[in-house]
Amino acid sequence: MISYRDSSVGYLKLVHCGNAACSAGNSTATVDASAQVGEYSSIAVGVDGLPVIAYYDNTNSYLKVAHCGDAACLVSATLATVDIAGVVGEYTSIAIGADGLPVISYRDATANDLKVAKCGNANCSAGNTLTAVDTVGVVGLYTSIAIGADGLPVISYYDGGNGNLKAAKCGNAACSSGNTLIAVDSVGNLGQYTSITTGADGLPVISYYDASNGDMKVAKCGNAFCSPYFRRR
């Protein structure tokens, strides 16, 4: 399943592949045609087996979420506006938390912050918790979120003010307290186009762009916090 923006009409769309290579039997659905929408889309599969998509509403500068009615999103999706406070929703990344509910990292362009939305239900239509996770400098670009082995989110992102790759390890499921912020790589201008996942050993691994050298880099974290100073006692 692939979510994307059709820039010719400004709609959010989804392709459901007909085979493992997406070479035959694909179906295409228009998920949201309410305005100019669909930029920075990110997709995950909920515990119900249905796609859930976080994306940017270009017309209103909002963070939105679509929860599909079937696996191919051919049945109308439930659309929810999650954050409307300023220009919010760029660089979205979505994951399904240990509680089965979506959690989304994104940028607040008005405040230049990294934010996280923890959804209160599967549709993200009520009970959401919105948290500014990093508010120092120009941060929150190119976010990517994963769920750690401890069930808590970990986020990679670009610190645009300092040109650093950073990681945020959340202190709880909503990232609303106890967060740890770490500069993972700070030698040169690097950290754009981040992508994070959790390895077989339960520790984060991050791919990203080194703009100073034009290289692709990978950071394998030595602990759940991606901190060089962490020690267990």
Image (spheres, helix red, strand yellow):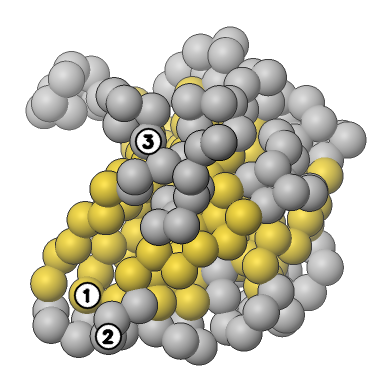
Spot occupied by residue 146 in the image (x, y as percentages of width and height): 47, 39
10 Å crowding of disc 3: few (<14), some (14-19), many (20+):
some
Residue at 56 percent across and 55 percent down: it is 168
Compare residues 5 and 110 and report the one nearer the observer: 110
Against 30, residue 25 (above or below) is above
- Asked if marks 1 and 2 touch (Cβ < 8 Å), the reply is yes
SS class, disc 2: loop
- The relative height of residue 190 versus residue 156 in the rendered view (above or below) is below
Label 1 sits on what residue type? Answer: Asp
Pointer 1 or 2: first along the chain: 2
Q: Which numbered dot is residue 39?
A: none
Q: Is residue 192 left or right of residue 217?
A: right
In this view, the mark in front (1 or 2)? 2
Q: CA distance from mark 1 to mark 2?
A: 8 Å
Amino acid at dot 3: Leu
Report the residue marked by disc 2: 188
Of all residues, the one furthest to the front in this rendering is: 233
Viewer-side residue, 129 vs 205? 205
Residue 1 on image: x %, y %: 35, 30
Residue bearing the label numbered 1? 210
Alpha-carbon span between mark 1 and mark 3:
22 Å
Q: Amino acid at mark 2?
A: Gly
Give the answer, above or below, for where 196 lies relative to 162.
above
The C terminus: image quadrant: top right
* Residue 191: quarter of image: bottom left
Q: Of label 2 and label 3, which has the lower sequence position?
A: 2
